Amino acid sequence: MAEAVFSISEINEYVRMVLDGDARLRRVWLRGEISNFVNHYKTGHFYFSLKDEACSIRAVMFRGSNIRLTFTPENGMRVLALGEIRSYPRDGQTQIVVSEMQPDGAGSLALAFEQTRRKLEAEGLFDAARKRPLPTYPHRIGVITSPTGAAIHDIIRITSRRYPLCELVVFPALVQGEGAAESLRMGVDFFSAVDLVDVIIIGRGGGSMEDLWAFNDEGLARSIAACRLPVISAVGHESDVTICDFVADMRAPTPSGAAEMAVPDRSELYTLLSGLETRLHRAMDARLTRAREALALRKNHRLLTSPYSLFDERRMHLCLREERMQRALDRLIEQKRAALGNRAARVEALSPLSVLSRGYAMVSDEASGTMLTSASALTEGQGVRLRFADGTATAEVRSVEQNEQCKENE
């Protein structure tokens, strides 16, 4: 019986069909070490190989998937990769198309952690200047954690003991495993968007680095940095450090410590209020004592014992003012009288009557009353009136004689 002869393309196509038909190969987790890593600068796709102690497989992670990574892959980094096994007939190569990837092992996790830390620190997300103070007396606290974990019970216990006036609003979130980072981000974004709480606590109890990895998510860190409310990070035990601790406004070593930071201690408040009450009583007693002393001084005041003395003082004051005004008026009158006398003397000196009193007379025409000031204005036989200082007289001009000088001027 003759054996069938296949072309290479037929064999490669058959292998592809077999692999595509195996549902188990559509979602495979592979653990391995990255080698031959290439970040294609034009497309943004990642090309690399995954290898273990015995074998290796080619891998590709397209840009639509790798933009969600919280770390930068490097050669030698151990990772866990989720993807689909495919075979390409053109070159007969089998590879995994990676859709998700995360560091595997303490060394790789530490490297990814350090990459994220350096990146966010360079952007200023850890700067002390951008961190906000916690409210002194919060009315409500938003808690983002697992509703069944030990962390929420510790927070409830501490807040109830220290400050029972405060209410807790819990956003139930995943704190580890797949989807935990997204669940925590949703909690931060929710409290930031609604006017419900005054401060946020985000955290969980202790665990391995892998268990706490969701709190190293870059997207979660950016949500905390953009949150309009102050955030307290309370992840793990005191020795555990996450990216959340760096970007939060306050870092607590434990969830219990976060509760103590978030609320005041009512015993300290009682002490404070007691001290304020004592100071208030002392201040009121001192003020009342001063008021009594002032009242005692005022009740013996002359105005109260003899109210008419006020009118006497006013009357005396008015009399003094009247005297001053009268003296000022007398001085003014004397000044005006003296000025008037001076002006009268000057007028008297210029008056024609004063001239007449020295033996002169004024001559006027008897008929018309016209003043005659020149001999040339007189004619013989003209009737004239003469006015003297002490009376008048009429006369008739018998003759007119002019001075020689006046004739020459004429």
Image (cartoon, rainbow, N blue to C red):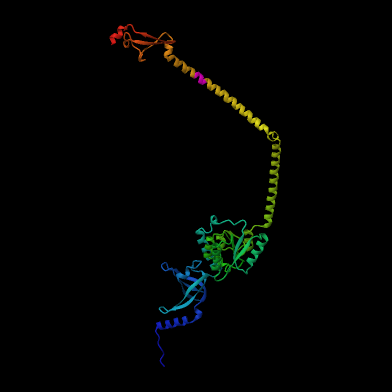
Q: In this view, does 162 lie to the left or right of 211?
A: right
Residue drawn at (45%, 78%) of the image:
87
Horizontal side, residue 348 vs residue 282: left or right: left
Q: Where is residue 271 in the image (x, y as percent from the top left)?
A: 69, 53
Up the image or down, 303 lies above or below 167; here it is above
Q: Where is residue 61 in the image (x, y as percent from the top left)?
A: 46, 71
Instruction: Using the image as rendered, state which of residue 86 and residue 168 is in the foreground.
Output: 168
> Magenta segment, principal secondary structure?
helix
Figure quadrant of the N terminus: bottom left
Q: Is residue 317 above or below residue 150?
A: above
Residue at 61%, 29% in the rendered image = 318
Q: In this view, does 45 lie above or below 225?
A: below
Q: Can residue 254 be seen in this view?
A: no
For the question of whether residue 219 can be seen, the reply is: yes
Write down the region rendered in magenta.
335-339
Residue appearing at x 63%, y 29% in the figure: 315
Q: Can residue 85 be found in the magenta stretch? A: no
Residue 213 horizontal/vertical position (percent): 56, 67
Front position in the image: 235 or 74 = 235
- Where is residue 365? Give x, y as percent: 35, 13
Q: How many marks?
A: 0
Q: Which of 327 and 300 is in front in this view?
A: 327
Quadrant of res 238: bottom right
Between residues 86 and 370, which one lies in front from this camera angle? Answer: 370
Q: Which residue is outermost to the bottom?
A: 1
